[in-house]
Amino acid sequence: MLGTFLSIMFIVLLPMNGHGAESLLKLLGPNIKAKAEDVVCLQCHPDVSDNTMNYLHYPAGVGACNYCHIARPEHLQGDNPPESVSINRTSENCYNCHDRKDEKPVKHGALADPESCIRCHNPHSSNTRHLLQSDTVPTLCSTCHRNTVVGKSQHGPAIKGKACIHCHNPHSATEQKLLHRPAKELCLSCHNEEIKATLNDSRIIPNIKKKLELTGVHPGANGTCLDCHKPHASDNLRLLTARWSVATYNQYSEQQNPYGLCFTCHETDMLQQSDFETKTGFRDNHTRMNLHWFHVVDAAGNTDKSRGRSCKICHDPHGAPQAHDINSAWLMNGNPIPIEYQVIESGGQCTKSCHSLRVYKR
């Protein structure tokens, strides 16, 4: 039985990175042992060493009650006057065996509680790994933190698997919000390959890290991902912080702006038909044409203004292989339509399936 308990607790207690394992093993061997009076404890408290649970804390598993409790003689004789049993609930007692978890500069607020360890971990046994007090990590976190994964769009890591601790250290960290790494670096540790979308298996999230290494990197992408995306959930598609239509064609109006996210940085003046000289570089001074207005608002001259071209046809919000984050292709019914753009003196030229070569000069 002791061998079984010891095997279980190697999984539960030993640090995952091996740091401190040798000293812990030395401590477990000679120091944590059941005493004669502990046998008496288990006669009244058999649930403490309940081997039907998935995980047992080593001292409880071997019946070493004395390591955290001190029972006065009158308690062992059957009486139970107040304070006849002392309980060392403090985190400092836990640190007698476990590596400290409070040494990094950004600390989980819960650690300010002297009894913080047992607020989250059961000191005896649990059905959840790491002896958690709840069945899942999100359930435990939500006892203090508001549920942040409600919305039209939900971040896969926030709702699956280890959930919160995919990104956050539950004890202390060097980064704000207890992040394991700086925010952008953390995002790109997963978004460095194509990912099948969580809520729509037909959509593939592209390799964002690769896009950020292309020639036409969107200046906004040089900031943090959280400038445009919420980390947990959003009422907007793609975890976006503001409205942004994924449709290829939209009818534009300032009141019902389908590209609200873009215009948290860009000025909507760039879409005005006249007085555009200082508002947009995508213009032809010879024809006095604001080409952003022409494509997005005027639907490229189409009488049906609901055919206004989406920003995403020409631009990628992360990065693209051509200048001004211009795509090399856009998709029509799943088929790639090439875009060839070239910067020229005081302007540019564009060729794609929509039209033959067009040149604009400012």
Image (spheres, rainbow, N blue to C red):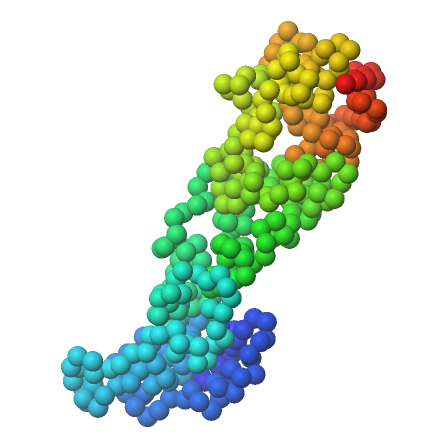
Q: Depth check: give the residue in front, 48 or 171.
A: 171
Q: Position of residue 84 (x, y in %)?
A: 21, 83
Give the residue furthest to the front.
Answer: 278
Q: Position of residue 255 (x, y in %)?
A: 49, 18
| In the depicted structure, whether residue 236 falls above or below residue 46 | above
Answer with the quarter of the image where residue 269 lies: top right
Q: Depth check: give the residue in front, 300 or 247.
A: 300
Residue lying at 40% horizontally and 65% vertically, measured from the top left: 111
Residue lying at 24% horizontally and 82% vertically, measured from the top left: 85
**Quadrant (top left/top right/bottom left/bottom right) for the C terminus:** top right
- Taking the image as shown, residue 334 lies to the left or right of residue 63, namely right
| In the depicted structure, whether residue 276 falls above or below residue 58 | above
Q: Position of residue 161 (x, y in %)?
A: 52, 55
Decide if residue 316 is in sight here.
yes
**What number of labels is visible?**
0
Residue lying at 55% horizontally and 43% vertically, measured from the top left: 226
Decide if residue 51 is in sight here.
no
Q: Depth check: give the residue in front, 29 or 228.
A: 228
- Taking the image as shown, residue 213 lies to the left or right of residue 181, namely right
Residue lying at 71% horizontally and 41% vertically, measured from the top left: 211
Q: Position of residue 334 (x, y in %)?
A: 70, 28
Give the residue furthest to the top.
Answer: 303
